[in-house]
Image (tube, grey):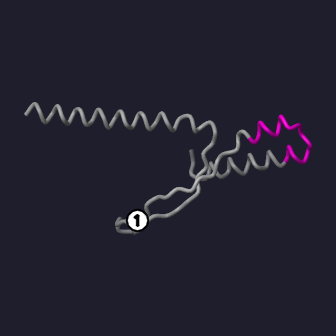
Amino acid sequence: MQPDAKEERVMLLEAWKAFEESVGSSEEVLAKVEKKLPRRVKRKRPIYTEDGTPAGQEEYYDYIFPEEQGAVPNLKILEAAHRWKKQKLEQEGGEGE
């Protein structure tokens, strides 16, 4: 997904919601649109100078869409499994020598 795609997606969903409100759509239709709206979260990322040295952190806002939330816990489990496997391989490699 492109960096600005999330913001464009949010703007599109907000415009869709405003349209449904102006037309006088039913509560059911509005609820469907609102269900697709993301949560806005504040995150931090490292900042680097031109020569590559760390220069602190920058706060930015990110959007978490409801359909993306289900994938996040699975990624954390997968990352933990990779760390565990790497740790086990390092332990077995150290014992064999």
The structure residue drawn at horizontal position 35% and vertical position 65%, both measured from the top left corner, is: 52
Which residue is at the front of the view, 80 or 45? 80
Q: Residue at x 48, y 33 (%)?
A: 74
Residue at the image point whose x is 76% and y is 49% from the top: 14
Question: Measured from the top left, where is residue 35 in percent x and y?
Answer: 72, 39
Quick one: SS at disc 1? Answer: strand
Q: Nearer the viewer, residue 4 or 37?
A: 37
Query: Which residues fall within the magenta stretch?
Result: 19-34
In the rendered image, residue 25 lying in the magenta stretch gets the answer yes
81 or 22, which lies in front?
81
* Above or below 91: residue 22: below
Q: Where residue 49 sits in the image (x, y, percent)?
A: 40, 69
Residue at x-position 53% and y-position 62%: 59
Q: Main secondary structure of the magenta part?
A: helix
User: With respect to residue 70, does 1 lie above or below?
Assistant: below
Q: For the N terminus, which image quadrant?
A: top right
- Residue furthest to the left in view is 97
Q: Quadrant of residue 65?
A: top right
Determine whether, in the image, residue 59 is placed left or right of residue 5. left
Residue 92 position, x and y percent, is: 17, 31
Which residue is label 1 attached to?
48
Horizontally, residue 67 falls left or right of residue 58, namely right
Residue 27: x percent and y percent? 86, 38
Q: Quadrant of residue 96?
A: top left
With 92 as the anchor, is 66 left or right in this view?
right
